[in-house]
Amino acid sequence: MGSVVAPGATVSVCYMDRRPADGTVRGGPPTTTSGPVYGAGLDGPRSAAHSMTSPDRRRDSPPADGQASPSASRRLAESLEILVFTYDRAERLHDTLARLEDSPFGVCRITVLDNCSPDSTPDVCREFTERLPALRVVRHSRNIGLGPNYLRAVELSRADYSWILSDDETLDLHVCADVIAAVEAAEVDLISLGSPGQHAWERGLRSSTQELVDRGQRFFWVWTFAAGVIFRTETFDDHCLRSGYQHLHGDYAHFPHFEFVYESLRRDASVYVSEHVCVSRSEGSAPRTQGTPLSWFTQIVRPTTRIAEPAWRQEAVWEAAPSRRTWALALAQAIAIEKLDHPDRMWRHLAELMVSLVGPQRLLLVALAPLALVPRPALLAVRRAVAAADRVRRRYRAEA
């Protein structure tokens, strides 16, 4: 194992250093960032990945319902690495690390990638280096952006499985014995822990990616929720990494892992769906991530243009709404809201959608585009009427 770096020391970290047995470098163009790195230190090639579980680095959790035994904890620590990317949300990061500490996953190596947060994030990280035995912290010397931070988390992982979290998801990890068993058995490529839009999925299901699509599940919508999936590290290969970096400022601006999700479908990766929802999107995080409804529609459609299979491409676009029947309604509402709130950006989004959509989805957009010409006073009147009707419905429900 690499030597432990003293707290607060500044080192030069090359993130393109995950090497297979032949020593070649995987990933995109070599990029080096300087910043404080402390905690469990940075390991070298992946062959040394599991040395962090030497006796002086272990912490066995006591057996409990839904938790692993001490021997299982050691196997879990050797099999899974958790990486948390963060920026300027020290309080939420504190909550996330505390939940991990108070779970069977506290024995795993946990890496925090701090995007040069200006708040008290470094203090939170230093606090948890005393509480989590295998915590390491990589603080970038500048904010490199969410997408690059995610991809560097992929590159840094050395365990057989990786779980990449943002700092503000809601975790419920007290009943997760089946997830631990799936990681230790190492029989599946993807483990789904929960996601928006996954309410119709059968829990405890063993399946494959193409079977899920055949069942009509919202595949792309669910798997692009990064925090909701544990994946076999080697499947996020050089091609997926290079594609992620190549399209960070284009098609994959909001989904740097989209190529990985797409490739998982193409090779029909094996899947396990956890018995209980362990991860969910926290309240208030969606507006920060998604922006306006029309902007979000555009963000969803943009990466689908790289899907070669027409049926899968159209299915990925339909998933922008809960069902095909509500897709046109959702798009109509998005156009109306954009006209009211951000008319300066509306035509740019509509133009991009017109180019990106194909088949029946483009025809629906053509049919709905005249909404952009409706006078704003008329749309404001409709908004007020809808809001009033909604208040009446809520009052009646409260009184019932």
Image (spheres, rainbow, N blue to C red):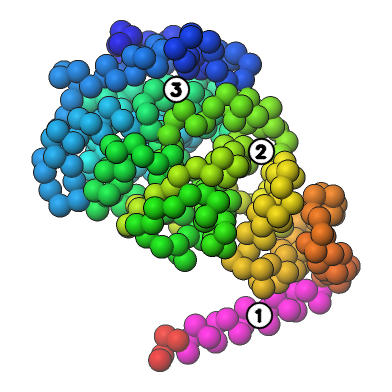
Mark 2 lies on residue: 252
**Place of residue 359 in the rendered image (x, y in percent of width and height, measured from the top left):** 82, 59
Q: Where is residue 383 in the image (x, y as percent from the top left)?
A: 70, 75
Instruction: Judge whether residue 281 can be spotted in this image.
Output: no
Left or right side of 104 for 251: right
Q: Which amino acid does label 1 sit on?
A: Val
Q: Is residue 152 visible?
A: yes
Q: Earlier in the sequence, mark 2 or mark 3?
A: 3
Dot label at residue 386: 1
Towards the viewer: 142 or 229: 229
Element carrying mark 2: loop
Instruction: Name the spot of residue 147 as percent of width and height, x first.
Output: 58, 33
How many other residues sit within 10 Å of disc 3, few (<14), some (14-19) or many (≥20)?
Answer: many
SS type, badge 3: helix
Label 2 – label 1 distance at C-alpha: 35 Å
At 57% from the left edge and 24% from the top edge, which residue is drawn?
238
385 or 166, which is in the foreground?
Answer: 166
Vertical order, 143 against 222 (above or below)? above
Residue located 79% across and 54% down the image: 357
Label 3: which residue?
156
Instruction: Point out the stretch of residues depicted in magenta.
Output: 377-396
Q: Nearer the viewer, mark 2 or mark 1?
A: 2
Tell whether position 391 is magenta: yes
Q: How far apart are marks 2 and 3 (CA)?
A: 20 Å
Examine the rendered structure and indicate whether residue 340 appears above or below residue 265.
below
Q: In which quarter of the image is residue 156?
A: top left
In what element is the residue under mark 1?
helix
